[in-house]
Image (cartoon, grey):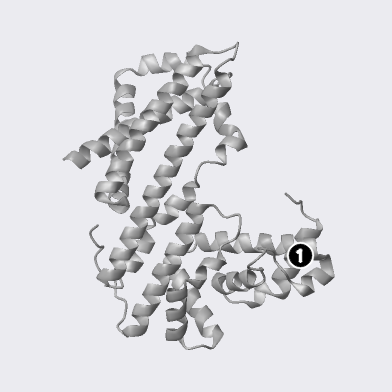
Amino acid sequence: MQSLGQPVDTAVRDLEDRTLSRLHGGVSKIVYLSATRNYNTGEYQHEGLAQRFGASIAQDALARCHETVFHDLLETSLQDLVEQLRAYIESTGAEQQKVLHSWRQLEAYRVLIPVNCDPLSADYFITNLRIALEALRLDARSDRPNLPTSLPQQ
Amino acid sequence: MTFTLIVVLCIALLLLLRVVLHRSTREEDGVPGDILNRSDYARRLPDRALLHQCLSPEDLEFIAARRSPGLTQLFLRERRRLALGWLRQIGREARGLYRQHLRSVRDAADLRLSAEAKLLLAVVLFSITYGAILTAVECYGPFRTRRFLLSLQGMANILIELGNRIAGSIAPAGLAGLDAAAGGR
């Protein structure tokens, strides 16, 4: 565990200030951080960060940010997750239906999980995203307002 | 009726387990307390916050408000699966911890039988409670089980409080004497 003032902490702050703070919502952040990871080796790559702090520190900083954002998303309510997902899809500029279809069919969200995540947390995250995607798909199909109703029976 | 019995059994066992663990951790030589405090052991247990989040009533209300039977079924099915997964993992880890403990004390020269008996009792209570909760979640789903447990816990707290009041009102001299003997703590 690195203490405050260590190079990794500085790199984490740098990454947060320069990049992550400009992204709206945890979903956008985790998509960005996952995209910096090489799918073959599992290593994170960020040229700017590596130039400033070195490849190893940049790797640790990206991994740590990824885990932090992931755990924040685990604690996010479904309602917030749906809104974050909606904001992310809008930020891509792509047609919402196409993105939803692609995410549901390809299950692209599976690459968003950090490498050291425990299986139960990973399962919970994937399940929540599937439910959020389904909720967004339903919203897109009908313009009816979401009025409160009685709780469902199990 | 059966469900109520299961839930009452769960509550009683949980309270008993809590008392046993509380006493065990207060023991100076307390083997169970030491085990729970060691990070190597404790970190293997699943995160309690994950189950709490999984059973969030806000999420259930959010899904219910969308009035989609398909989405509701998906949500309830997945939450049940996740809750069962969490329960099975904690059961697996607890059994593993006890087996590990047995291996480590098998040849110990300074084996303390009272501490071992308390630990065994805790393990037995855990197993029974685990089985009861697992059955309840499998049969009735996590949200209904949670609601029953919460309401019964609330009633049990009221009963305990009332019991203390009754005890205090019928034997004030005795309690005062106990307080004085304990140094007024």
Q: Residue at x 49, y 33 (%)?
A: B96
Determine the residue located farthest toward the top in the rendered image.
Answer: B109
Q: Residue at label 1?
A: A58
* Displayed quadrant of residue B173: top left
Q: Secondary structure at mark 1?
A: helix
Looking at the rendered structure, the kind of residue marked 1 is Ala
Q: Is residue B82 left or right of residue B181?
A: left
At label 1, counting other C-alpha atoms closer than 10 Å, the crowd grade (few under 14, some 14-19, many 20 or more) is: many
Q: Decide: is B183 above or below A38.
A: above
Q: Horizontal and vertical percent for residue B158?
A: 30, 37
Residue A60 at x, y = what percent?
73, 60
Residue at the front extreme, as displayed: A40
Chain letter of mark 1 equals A
Question: x%, y% of residue B118?
Answer: 45, 20
Of A8 and B74, nearer the camera is B74
Residue B160 horizontal/vertical position (percent): 32, 31
| Residue sitting at x 56%, y 13% | B111
Q: Is residue B56 above or below residue B129?
A: below
